[in-house]
Image: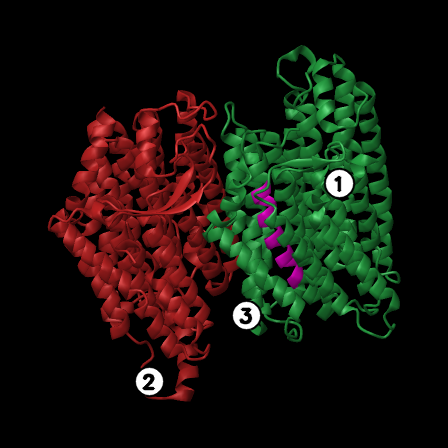
Amino acid sequence: MSFLSLLVFSPLLGIILLAFVRRTDTKTIQWLGTAATVPPLLLALFAFIRSGSGFRLEQLDESYDWVRLANLPFFTDAAYVIRYELGIDGLSLLFIVLTAVLGTLAAVASLLIKVEKKGYFMWLLALEIGMLGVFAAANFIWFFLFLEVTLVAMFLLVGKWGGFERERAAYGYLLYNGLGSALLLVVIAVLVARTGTANFALLHETLHNPVAEGQLIAPLTAEARYWLLGGLLLAFAVKLPAVPLHRWLVRVHVEAPPPVVMLHAGVLLKIATYGMIRFGIGLFPDEFRAFAGAIAVLGVINILYGALLALRQRELKHVLAYSSVSHMGVVLVGLGALNEAGIQGAVFQSVAHGLIAALSFLLVGVLANRIGTTDIHRLGGLAKAMPIFSGYLLTAALALLGLPGLAGFVGELTAFLGLFETKPALAAAGALGLIFAAVYSLRAILDITFGHTRERYESTLGLRGAKESAASVSEPRVIDLQAKEAVPAFVLVALIVAVGVYPQLLAEPLATVLETMMNGLGG
Amino acid sequence: MNDVWQANWSMMTPEWIVLAAAIVLLLIDLVMPKERSRRPLAWGAAAGAVLALIATAAMIPADPVSILHDTFRLDGFAKAFKLILLAGGALALLLVAEWEPKEGSHYRGEFAYMMLFALLGAMMTASSGDLLTLFVSIELLTVSSYVLAGLRKTATASNEAALKYVINGGIATAIMLFGMSYVFGLTGTTNLGDIARELQETNEPYMLALAFLLLLIGVSFKLATVPFHMWAPDVYEGAPVPATAFFSVVSKTAGFVLLLRLFVTIFAAAPAEGRDPSSLLLSMQPVITVLAGLTMIIGNVVALRQRSLKRLLAYSSIAHAGYLLAGFAAMSWAMIDSLWIYLLAYVFMNIGAFAIVAHIVNETGSDDLAGLAGLYRHRPLLAAALGLFLLSLAGIPGTAGFIAKFYLFIGLVVTEPGHYVLATVMAVTTVVSYVYYFNLLVQLFFRPASLAPLRRLPAGLSTAVVLCALGTLAIGWVPDLAYDVLAQFGHFGDFLP
């Protein structure tokens, strides 16, 4: 078995083993589910480290015959052959590492899940396979296949293990993302039908020097290319999400179980960034120019709209949901700039937000578990009861508002640098949103950690206390972050700082990809 | 008379097998003591269908031949679609073997051999090269189907279904025959190949267009596509579940076989008015496109509101007929290929779903979708299998449904100008269908069990479910298995006589 297939499908082993564990044996399930996320992590880190020391990632490419859709005498042998192809470059590698890291951390954080743990872990691992596969796929069909695996897995994870309105959130997710996927499928079908291949590299070649394959394949007209790119961008705009297509995201952030949101906000949203860069800029560089202005404007709208709404929320999950909308706007801003700094910024921001969002939701999960509410107005003074937790929460807030030296700053700075280069006025407007970010994140976090007193939620605690005191009198009323929860939080903070202090970590693998991309744009 | 004796009858081996099995079973049923269970008869019928399937598969490499003045053809098209029909028929017969209605299964013997007769009709349709054989064989299928729908003599719903089916089917047959009479009148022959050649010379575009529309109405009834789809939900709901499974798969396939044989052979050659689109079929393409779009929309949207599993699957099958009709409307080089792949995938995923529905109806006596609630708790494997079939019907990757639907998409956009609107309608209605298929998943996996746990799946049903699940997964993950079979027919180059 080859390296990439092993990387993508290794969680499958966990799923199979889990099938044989008894439903009630939660300890084994937790242990096995977490262990199953380790192989992809190790393999991804291995590839990351090797690529740092000059290993060429193309050597990992794999390709097997899969299906020959048509075999007409006037086609060449390779036409309409869809292969099973995996292959990565620096861009995909970054996202794969992000996925693998967050996958393991989310599995650890799933300690909080109490019901039907077996099914939960099986689907969580399926979700991880889907996410890894999306980034490792080297052709459109397999990209789509893995993308839909994440769709089904997310639907079930949100719908079964989510909060009170979970089914509504799950259907919202399904419909929005289903429509995005459907649109994507039409685009893919057109590309495959008109070029006879689904492979990214071959598509790139065929689109740029169209060769007459046979009179029955009609080449793509210039107009059709604009439509295709428009369809692609719209499909990924739903998944990013861009305002006004963001309603589903808010619901999922609020209703889904926190470990799942870690993966959702951390990785799934980033598939849109990846798709826009890989397919939008990668396949249609010339056409992308026409859309760049609109994308940048959308990005600024996202930033401002998300930030303004985040200011007004009472519920911490809502604040974070709208901050996700706002932060994904930065990605659009970077892409809209359409220069090296911009694209680099979009990728930085995606990775940074992935880490920060994961940290935030890890903590939100703990909060909901301990206090039973994440309503800002009902919380306060947690710094005394849970000092370690509050420290992490403050770090998350600082990262969220883009404090220099932390990951968020790098992404925002680079993306905006890019936009200032091309569209200064727009960039200035967007930069306003960064100020709002400081306000909403600090407001929320300070209210929770310092705030007034605990009186406001004392009733909740009192109730809990009464119940618990019946069981054991000596137990403290609010438990601070435990070691099992502190480890993932610590890892995330370490990564956030590492990226913030040494952004070269991300820039190095990206360098060659960006170079090719800029050549495409320039030429 | 000489022709009859000298004809190469061996090319009809699959038909002989099915016919012989039906007659033998009929006789056994006659002499068998009344109190003996008829279950072995259904198994025998399934074995007959499998035998015919093997015989058909053995004939794949043979050159195309025809007998009796080209009334019976054995070309790639006939062989390819007979494979699907026989596979669907055999699987449906497994459902018959485990059919347990409330009032008792006294008619299981009749059920089995009537289904074989219907299957024979469908197979003959695939091989017909003449209007007469085409008509007779499709009527053999239809008339047998009426009986199948009304098999539960004492159940009102079953009687209602049969009556509605007879009335609607009768009207459709009459209209189709009327259309055929125009074609005959214009050409003076019933042979499809001769008709095509004659029509190239005729200059009666309006008469021909009328014939086209009448035939389209007739076929549309058989396919249950908009606007002649209304009978399907009632018939599907009232008929016994195995019969419903048979209608939704075998009858539908036969309908598309009829559509292709009739329209592609006759009207692709006929000149159109104004002679700009080169043939009548192409000039009528917009009509078919609109009908396909409407079928997809109405089938999927109405399915959203169904509580009965059978009605839900009925509307879902209307929607799938819409996807298939869209593949026909595309009229690209991939047309017959993509329909074949889709119908093959449809056999597995739909009969698989019906097999599990049949078990639930047998056990609970109702087909309300609440009957699925909590199935995962008691029968996790069964729930997983049904989940697989539903995901496949929804066209989620990793299943046969996706591969098939993707090929339809390719057919839609491969020509210039592509049918982008139709492709988009198909994509959007697919997402609409997610809502009701996933709603069933919600019942299966999220809801607490409200009913007593179901018993184990009986042998016939579990065989059907396992085979269907294997087929669905195999085409989904190793699509070359299906495409390699398809490649042997050489894109149906010998289709036109």
Q: Nearer the viewer, residue A406 or A220?
A: A220
Q: How is the image coloured?
A: by chain
Q: Nearer the viewer, residue A257 or B153?
A: B153
Disc 2: which residue? A475
Give the letter of the chain under mark 2.
A
Residue A477 figure quarter: bottom left
Vertical placement of residue A27 versus A224, above or below: below
Please indicate whether residue B374 sits to the left or right of residue A185 in the image: right
Please indicate whether residue A444 sits to the left or right of residue B435 in the image: left
| Amino acid tagged 2 | Glu
Q: Main secondary structure of the magenta part?
A: helix
| Amino acid tagged 1 | Lys
Disc 1: which residue? B222
Residue B99 figure quarter: bottom right
Crowding around mark 3 (Cα neighbors within 10 Å: few <14, some 14 to 19, many 20+) is some
Chain in red, by letter, is A
Q: CA distance from mark 3 to mark 2?
A: 40 Å
Callout 3: SS: helix
Image: magenta residue range? B340-356
| Amino acid tagged 3 | Pro
